Image (tube, rainbow, N blue to C red):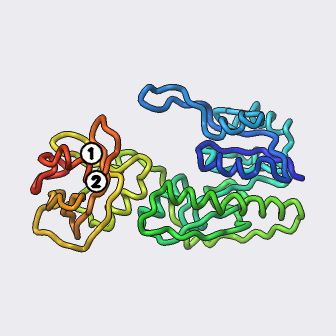
Amino acid sequence: MLTIAFAGTPEFAAQHLQFLIGREHAVIAAYTQPDRRAGRGKKTTPSAVKILANAHHIPVFQPESLKTLAAQEQLQELAPDVLVVVAYGLILPRAVLEIPRLGCINVHGSLLPRWRGAAPIQRAIEAGDIETGVTIMQMDEGLDTGKMIERVACAIAPTDTSAEVASKLCQIGGPALLRSLNALERGDATATTQDETESCYAAKIDKREALIDWSQSAVTLECKIRAFNPAPVAYSTLQGDRIKLWRASSTGQSSDHPPGTIVSSEEGVLRVACGQGSLLVEQIQLPGKSRMTVAEVLNSRRQLFSSNSQLGT
């Protein structure tokens, strides 16, 4: 049996922690980022990992940084066999990497070396990838550059959002993590060096990226909308109001209208002219309202979305 310190923050990490709880290895501590203000009321909110760890009486530690001597001494006192890191959000310095007897391993949401960085799931969808997966790797001081213990592939369906892909990855990530831990315990884990020539950088999502540029192709915009669902949510403007775009599909059907023009609002969708092709918008959210299908919105606000109306204004 291994003793495990777990480090993670969002729901994706919590799902992997849940998979480990109650199995053959002992989770002796959970590291997660400090509580942050979130939501409209900016209420201080604990992370998904903290909530789960507390529910299972696992000690929780929330240092602002792992670069301090105090934080490192705290981990040394725990003396875990291994530190499992899943979407933690803090940098692990060399001193921390060297504390666990078997080192630190990371569950990364891509088939490394593709999409190293903070937002591998979103960037894979945005780029139009048809496959992604989970990589279990030994951590080093680089950005997702460590040797790979296991890679498990997963298809990205043409309609998948980042939330849906994350759910798929959780289903394969937990078992892959456990297999890797078992191999480490037995001493027969094999690790493969990444091919640096195949790496891409998955930069953190900036909210400013969510604004739709209608001069881009419909295919590009469809991928962005799926990638940014459920956060930060792609949007455009109409008569000064922000309209969030939750679901859409692309069509090669061209239009003589300027990009951003609503060409038609029939059969429960908005067909919007793009730089190439048209975007069929299916689900939106008006200011102060819940997300709704376009068909529902058109029942009460059809005039707002009449043909020749211009999005991006």
Image quadrant where residue 5 sits: top right
Q: In terms of secondary structure, where does tag 1 sit? A: strand
* Residue at the image point whose x is 16% and y is 57% from the top: 262
Residue 151: give its label: none
Image quadrant where residue 255 sits: bottom left
* Residue at the image point whose x is 84% and y is 39% from the top: 76
Q: In terms of secondary structure, where does tag 2 sit? A: loop
* Residue at the image point whose x is 75% and y is 37% from the top: 56
How far from the left and from the top, in percent, is residue 111?
Answer: 59, 67
Which of discs 2 and 1 lies nearer the camera? The answer is 1
- Who is closer to the viewer here, 170 or 129? 170
Q: Is residue 71 above or below residue 221?
A: above
Q: Is residue 207 left or right of residue 171?
A: left
- Who is closer to the viewer here, 238 or 91? 238
Amino acid, disc 2 = Ile
* Residue at the image point whose x is 22% and y is 61% from the top: 267
Residue located beneath label 2 in the image: 212
How far from the left and from the top, in percent, is residue 237?
Answer: 22, 45
- Within 10 angstroms of label 1, few (less than 14), some, or many (20 or more) residues? many
Q: Is residue 124 above or below residue 10?
A: below
The number of discs equals: 2
- Within 10 angstroms of label 2, few (less than 14), some, or many (20 or more) residues? many
The answer to the question of whether label 2 and label 1 lie on touching residues, with beta carbons closer than 8 A, is no
Amino acid, disc 1 = Ile
Residue 243: give its label: 1
- How far apart marks 2 and 1 lie (CA) works out to 10 Å
How far from the left and from the top, in percent, is residue 141?
Answer: 68, 53
